Amino acid sequence: MELRLFHYIPATRSEGPGIRACIQVQGCPIRCPNCAVPQTWATDSGLTIDSVVLAEQILKEQPRVDGVTFLGGEPFAQASALAEIGRLVKQHGLSVVTFTGYCRDEIEKANRKDFDALLEVTDLLIDGPFQQEKIDFSRPWVGSTNQRFHFLTDRYLNLVPMFETLPNKIEIRLMPDGRILINGLAPIRGLRSLIK
């Protein structure tokens, strides 16, 4: 199954618990105002890759990675392909974290097989659109207070008591071709202090 991809990170500590492969999909129908990555909105750009090929690439990173994170763009816009990846990596003991701009009840009420399939392989669902007026970086991995954590399995329940102390992080990568890639979340004042 074909997946439209904005970016793939083989290993990151900024997009969920532990060390994770990160699939950032291309295409988003939600288009939150002040989105950090509006370049992921278009559905006709990015790269295409077969979901099985990408799953195999992730599995080659074992035991270095604990799981895979799906973010966007909007993962539920490509739910079938991501569900296939999730199913394949979970067969090898990896976990799945899915970020979405939809609310969980919207996903469940949609009564769509592809949405249900992605929920079925997700251990931790982080839902809700980014809302600038509710900006908050005090919890890990999210940017506004309306965004919620849904533990769909018990895989990460042990993190609940630590949420007060788990910080948001960013990672900066210098690529061989000269590009600088940044992923994760941090307040802009924190980023400014890094650039002199």
Image (spheres, rainbow, N blue to C red):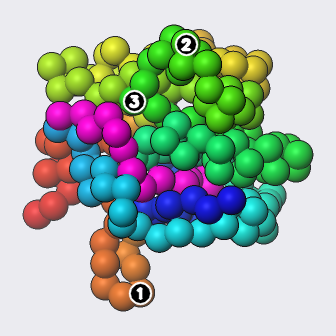
The amino acid marked with disc number 2 is Lys
Decide: is 66 above or below 147. Answer: below
Residue 109 numbered mark, or none = 2
In the picture, measured across the screen, residue 93 lies left or right of residue 40, that is right
Crowding at dot 3, Cα within 10 Å, few <14 / some 14-19 / many 20+, comes out as: many
Element class at badge 2 = helix
Image height check: is 138 above or below 89?
above
Packing grade of label 2 (10 A; few <14, some 14-19, many >=20) is: few
Question: Dot 1: within a 10 Å radius of its alpha carbon, few (fewer than 14), some, or many (20 or more) residues?
Answer: few
SS at badge 1: loop
Q: What amino acid type is highlighted by mark number 1? A: Pro
Q: CA distance from mark 2 to mark 1?
A: 45 Å
Which residue is situated farthest in the bottom direction here? 177
Whether tag 2 and tag 3 are in contact, CB under 8 A, the answer is no
Residue 64 - label: none
| Distance between mark 3 and mark 1 Cα atoms | 33 Å
Which of labels 3 and 1 is toward the front? Answer: 3
Residue pointed to by mark 3: 101
Task: Compare marks 3 and 1 and give the one earlier in the sequence.
Answer: 3
Magenta region: which residues? 19-33
Q: Which residue is mark 1?
A: 176
Q: Residue at x 32, y 34 (%)?
A: 30
Amino acid type, mark 3 = Gly
